[in-house]
Amino acid sequence: MELPRRIPYNPKWRVILLGAVFFGACSAFTAHKAAHNTVGLIINGIIALGPSGATLFYWVISALGAGYVLLALLLTARRIASPQILEVGRDALLLPYGRFQRQMSRIAYSDIQAVSEVQVLGQTFLYVTAGGLRFEITASLFPDSESYIAVKDLLLSHAPR
């Protein structure tokens, strides 16, 4: 990999859009169900709700879905207004972190103590321990798998054996 290099580090538009559509549809469906509910609800054969409890349950589920749509809109605004960049330098990696990734962490290659890759439910994460802190790099935020693999290989090359 040619250094220094700036790599976009953002959620993909497709994921944001599909999430907003899915949760918007769930919210609309459960709001309609709540607005027209006249019967109770039994959840997993364990919890029995009367008509008013079932209506409240549907409204809560609808509100949660609407909350996820709001988060997708905020993520869209953040992605447009402030696209995130992962910077691979000659002596350090600059990694966005924090709420909405508005802060940057500098990970000096000389401080790297360990690098490990973990897959959870189809998502790949790279954990970098440096200076006593643990940093998480999410593979799905890279524009392509080649960029992720190049960064992973670079970090692994600086990790102690």
Image (tube, rainbow, N blue to C red):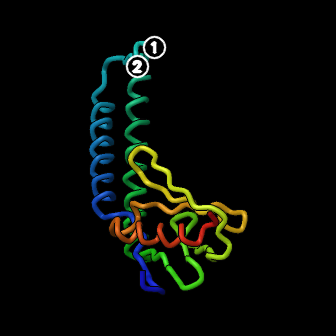
Q: Amino acid at mark 1?
A: Ile
Q: Callout 1: few (<14), some (14-19), or many (20+) C-alpha neighbours within 10 Å?
A: few
Residue 32 point in image, percent of width and height: 27, 35
Secondary structure found at label 2: strand
- Front-lying residue, 30 or 79: 79
Residue occupying image coordinates x 50% and y 73%: 154
**Drawn side of residue 153 relative to residue 22, left or right:** right
Q: Quick check: 113 above or below 104? A: above
Q: Quadrant of residue 42?
A: top left
Residue at disc 1, secondary structure: loop
140 versus 150 height, above or below? above
Q: For residue 40, what is the image quadrant?
A: top left
Q: Is residue 54 above or below residue 146?
A: above
From the viewer's side, name the closer residue of 117 and 44: 117
Look at the image and tell me in which quarter the N terminus lies. bottom left
Taking the view exactly as shown, the residue that stands out farthest to the right is 132
Relative image position of residue 95 (x, y in whole percent): 54, 72
Residues marked 2 and 1 touching at CB (< 8 Å): yes
**Residue underneath mark 1:** 46
Instruction: Report the side of 41 relative to 4 (left or right).
Output: left
Figure quadrant of the C terminus: bottom right
Q: List the residue tagged with mark 2.
A: 43
Which residue is located at x 48 percent, y 56 percent?
A: 125
Q: State the image quarter where residue 51 is shown.
A: top left
Find residue 55 and report its horizontal and vertical position in percent.
38, 27
Q: Residue furthest front?
A: 161
* Residue type highlighted by circle 2: Ile
